[in-house]
Amino acid sequence: MSNAFYWDQQYLKGEPPWDMHQVSPPLQTYFDHLQDNTLNVLIPGCGNGYEAGYLLDRGFTSITLIDISEVLMERLKDRFGRRLTLIIGDFFDLSGEYDLIVEQTFFCALTPSLRQNYIEKMYSLLRPGGKLAGLLFDRDFPDGPPFGGSREEYQRLLEKRFKVLTLAPCLNSIKPRMGTELFFIAEKPI
């Protein structure tokens, strides 16, 4: 859902119900294995920025967050200051080139009709050899957002543009999400 008013209201009400108050354990494990902290990283639909904070603590120096919620981005500006790049706006209007794009609940926040556009935009934002990595829900939700999906659907979408390196059930999800998350890494061909 790319409606700024909707997302502003979610953050004005308090902490959104999907907020984990921490970096996602599967992403933390992935980040811990990254050797190059000079990667140019993008986190779209960044939420409260736990992943960005973790990467900053690990010495990453080039992190961009984009979110459509001005309310949220003002909070992140107070929290992170000038240690990273903050963009208020629609992800589909973003330009740039990144080595790594982190997917953490952004895909599932978009209406399913935008999924092919998401794939095309991710492809256009990644450098050749760059990676799109993160989490996807492997379940259905009656009324989104979030919107769910299945491993088969994600495989079909990703394979249209990327080499899928990993798409597997998460073994270290937080308890409420255990058994319902897939971890993936997709690489833009060189």
Image: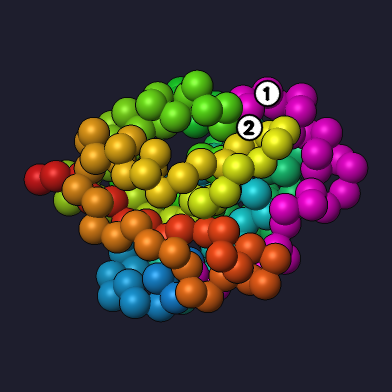
130 and 41: which one is in front? Answer: 130
The label on residue 68 is 2
The image quadrant where one finds the C terminus is top left
Q: Is 86 left, or right, of 34 in this rendering?
A: right
Neighbour tally class for label 2: few under 14, some 14-19, many 20 plus, Cα within 10 Å: many
Dots 1 and 2: beta carbons under 8 Å?
yes
- State which tag comes first along the sequence, 1 or 2: 1
Question: Given the image, on which type of amino acid does mark 2 rest?
Answer: Ile
> Residue placed at 60% from the left, 68% from the top?
178
Q: Is 169 left, or right, of 139 in this rendering?
A: left
Give the foreground label among 1 and 2: 1
State whether residue 37 appears in this view.
yes
Rendering coords of residue 55 (x, y %): 48, 68
Residue that label 1 marks: 3
- Queried whether the magenta region covers residue 24, the answer comes back as yes
Circle 1 — which element? Answer: loop
> Residue placed at 56% from the left, 65% from the top?
179
Rendering coords of residue 93 (x, y %): 46, 23
Circle 2 — which element? Answer: loop
Q: What stretch is highlighted in magenta?
A: 1-26
The image quadrant where one finds the N terminus is top right
Neighbour tally class for label 1: few under 14, some 14-19, many 20 plus, Cα within 10 Å: few
Q: Is 190 left, or right, of 34 in this rendering?
A: left
The label on residue 95 is none
